[in-house]
Amino acid sequence: MLDLTDIAAGYGETQVLHGLTLKAEPGRVLAILGRNGAGKSTTLKTIMGLLPLRGGTVRFDGQAIGGMAPFDIARLGIAYVPETRDIFKSLSVRENLDLAARRFPCPQGGWTVERVVDLFPRLGERMENGGDQLSGGEAQMLAIARGLLMNPRLLILDEPTEGLAPIIVRLIHDKLAELKHQGLSMVLVEQNFGFATSLADDVVIVSKGQVVWQGSPAAIRADTEAQHRWLGV
């Protein structure tokens, strides 16, 4: 579904990705692990067209998307939930959801406002509250819900547990596991090793802008040397 080949990208004069290559298969969850500064978030931003592609190719469902505008990439069926969440704080929860629902057509049986509220009942309790009145966990739920309202074929999440209390981390885990069970393809960047490996079907580790390890969650859990070398676990 998603195929990155020999990717080069960065910020200004600083190159962060140096020939990164990875694949995300349909109906599966790919976890991208690595230390801070390894290039994980840069990879996601390059996929979404938020950073220019300096080399290599990015293909989604066989189509080259490198160089496309972010909104065109989103329209192809990729929803991106950034680490910063980027909800509209001046709008209510209802307005945030309605805005996403109006921008993207809903296929039969697809994601509606009612359905995302069923997934995250807490949002139903906060519909009239402003985005600036939400807790970190509520903002993360809203960011994921807004992404689902795009009815994506691929959901990309950057550090969804960052700064959240353990009870909310467990809730987010359970909801993503539910989405996985429904067959939604996902790419997950996450520092929480247990969270990521319990959700993933496939794992890659990135260091200094390159993939240095790839395999199954069971394999990386068993490979303590790789954990220590590349993750500091």
Image (tube, rainbow, N blue to C red):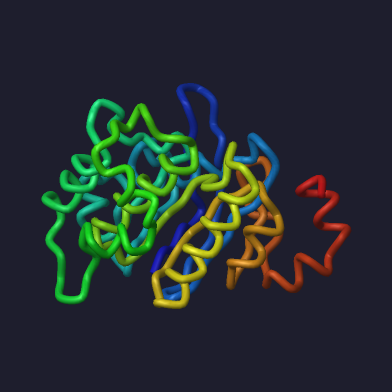
- From this viewpoint, is residue 203 visible? yes
Q: Which residue in the rendered view is the most extreme toward the top?
A: 13
Q: Which residue in the rendered view is the most extreme toward the right?
A: 225
45 or 149: nearer the viewer: 149
117 or 185: nearer the viewer: 117
**What residue sits 48% from the left and 58% below the top?**
5
Residue 129 position within the rendered picture, expressed as x and y whole percent measured from the top left = 29, 35
- From this viewpoint, is residue 76 visible? no
Residue 68 position within the rendered picture, expressed as x and y whole percent measured from the top left = 25, 46
Q: Is residue 208 left or right of residue 155?
A: right
**What residue sits 67% from the left and 40% below the top?**
208
**What residue sits 56% from the left and 49% below the top?**
168
Residue 31 position within the rendered picture, expressed as x and y whole percent measured from the top left = 58, 60
Give the vertical position of 79 relative to 127 (above or below): below
Q: Is residue 52 left or right of residue 25?
A: left
Q: Is residue 199 left or right of residue 155?
A: right
Can you tell which quarter of the image residue 139 is in?
top left
Number of marks: 0
Q: Is residue 226 left or right of residue 201?
A: right
**What residue sits 40% from the left and 34% below the top?**
134
Can you tell which quarter of the image residue 118 is in?
bottom left
Residue 57 position within the rendered picture, expressed as x and y whole percent measured from the top left = 40, 54
114 or 108: nearer the viewer: 114
Question: Considering the image in quadrants, where does the N terminus appear?
Answer: bottom left
Q: Which residue in the rendered view is the most extreme toward the front?
A: 125
